[in-house]
Amino acid sequence: MTIPDKMKAFVLTGHGDMDKLVYHTDWPVPVAGKGEVLIKVNACGLNNTDVNTRTAWYSKGVSENTTGGAFDSADDDDATWGGAPITFPRIQGADVCGTVVAGPDSLMGRRVLIETWMRDWNDPLNMAKTGYFGSECDGGFAEYVKIDQRNVHAIDSTLSDAELATFATSWVTAENMLNRANVTDGDIVLIPGASGGVGSALIQLANRRGATTIAMASRSKHDAVAGFEPDAILERAPDNLKKGLRQVIGRDTVSVVADVVGGDYWPQLIDVLDRGGRYTCAGAIAGPMVELDLRTFYLRDLTFTGATIVPPGLFADLVGYIERGEVKSALAATYPLERLHDAQRVFIDKKHTGNIVVTMT
Amino acid sequence: MTIPDKMKAFVLTGHGDMDKLVYHTDWPVPVAGKGEVLIKVNACGLNNTDVNTRTAWYSKGVSENTTGGAFDSADDDDATWGGAPITFPRIQGADVCGTVVAGPDSLMGRRVLIETWMRDWNDPLNMAKTGYFGSECDGGFAEYVKIDQRNVHAIDSTLSDAELATFATSWVTAENMLNRANVTDGDIVLIPGASGGVGSALIQLANRRGATTIAMASRSKHDAVAGFEPDAILERAPDNLKKGLRQVIGRDTVSVVADVVGGDYWPQLIDVLDRGGRYTCAGAIAGPMVELDLRTFYLRDLTFTGATIVPPGLFADLVGYIERGEVKSALAATYPLERLHDAQRVFIDKKHTGNIVVTMT
């Protein structure tokens, strides 16, 4: 096939409001270098990373407990997930399902997923040398992307391109959280924010390990969340979480909290952990600043693990789960690329359950 | 030898100020039951646990960032380290060095240390069934104590009784913290509160593992802290911790923070952790309520570990370190038992460096 010179792309021009995301129809198609693969994007999922980077939510100078609108006080030197400045213009979008159009014969024409963590392959475990696809390089809100061949995973699946574009960030993040917390079949896992991409993945991946799962979500989403088959569902923020737990599992503590929410409710999440319990976190959509009682923390021998950079190998595990049908996609809605603004507004509103994806066709 | 019926003892009569610690000269000597050992106490070290339990600092209802005086608002149902109510009268004091006067032949007449964690020996790893010597049962601020034989460790050492009474709580706690944080010879360990019992133990035990140690302490204590041989010493709370670190180790981050301080300065401690860094905590002498930025926590893949209940086996390791001379006691002062009030006032003032011990002779 012929590869054009120009493509459709949504380009982030700076930190700010939605108007910083600018649609182009004549953006240069990237050229794959040595060891790289050029992929025609079929679908690309949305993630909090896109919004957080645009609004500079990651910046140390920002402590508002909201997503969006915080960029006025942002320090641009510390505005990405990794604490480094971002280079503009930048095409965001990490969760790509596409077709290889230039690269090694073994991959040509294959449907592929992109492992989103870009490593220094001479030093792959060095977290300081790890970048994120769509943040430290251009991502998938465009018709074409290029990426190191070692990040490209061919996949055999009956799922659609849009369904396959729901996994890369949120599912890998969720599986990494469960690894960081050593979740096994003896655990009771409480999952705040269960209706989101990571939350719905946490339910399924913890169930896959045989753990007991308790989802927390707004009442309006309980039917949708039930589709991910948690063992129990609670409201988003019960007045008395211990009482709520007693009602659904007959005890008022859990062994693990797997959180992407944070916010004012956070101390209640910590307070229901068993002695020796584990808290793992990969986000703070309700606000990053939380109040910790060190007495609860040390006297109960708790373990807290942050979960961002995912070790090599985990993405391949996930591809296996998908190919064997052990997990199911939680596709909430698709939008054409041109309507990324609308897609992101719906995404930020958090009224949906599961993942939102833009498609290129 | 003849065991008397009555003994000298300091008895805690309730939560409150120092007047709740009442000296008796005719308190009943405990009677060792089956499987128990009776020990004549030679010396008993002071710990924050004594003060925190008396003042009900552990109580959830208390959030003042001070030690002492908080008991007015305490909830007595949650007033011990383990979250359970304490029974009065209670003899406190955990760090006993004594001589066995009743028990099995193998221990009779031996100088011994007491392992302070009391376990259900049918279920020794169950944290919910673990008690603390001098908290859930009577301890060593008295002439005699009884304890399960499995908690009694004979020791061969040239150290004095008072020196040997500095180890049981703070050193075991410190070693447990280093285990929880997986400290090895590649680590740089920052130690706030380095002048205290746990802090000075952390320096020596981290050095023993080959780690680089940076002690933080008030300037007036730097000479004394230098005696524990940290690789560098900083002030208690430098205005700019990163700058302070650069000056002494040529870099502005560390891999491990081993903390018993907490308080308002806490966010700065977390902010100097490397990506993938570890924070371990066994106390919060400057205040338990701290502000955590979940972004720092999860985006840097940090691991936080609380360290209270110590696994079986660690105490025996410590006895080995002492017997082989691998660690040295940090005895700051001794007081006769009758002057426990004075000893505890000095202890609370925190102007000393190392451990304070009461002796029975």
Image: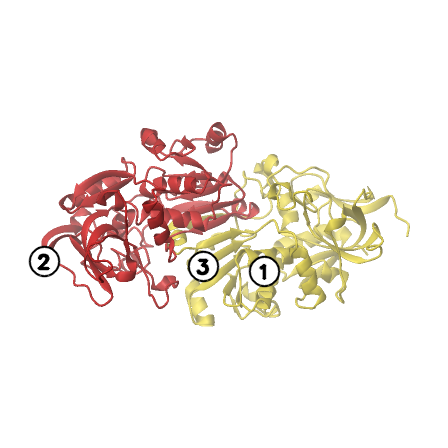
Chain colours: A yellow, B red
Relative to A134, does residue B90 appear above or below in the rendering? below
Q: Residue furthest top?
A: B247
Residue with the mark numbered 2 = B4
Residue receiving disc 3? A277
Instruction: Give the amino acid type for the residue marked by disc 2 in the picture.
Output: Pro
Is residue B131 found left or right of B257 in the rendered image? left
Observer able to see residue B263: no
Q: Foreground mark, 2 or 3? A: 2
Location of residue A237 in the rendering, given as x and y in whole percent from the top left corner? 49, 60
Mark sitting earlier along the chain (1/3): 1
**Local SS, label 1:** helix
Helix, strand or loop for disc 2? loop
In this rendering, the label closer to the viewer, 1 or 3 = 3
- x%, y% of residue B288? 37, 47
> Of the numbered discs in the image, which one, if any, rests on residue A199?
1
Residue kind at label 1, given as amino acid type: Gly
- Where residue A16 sits: x, y (%)? 65, 41
SS type, badge 3: strand
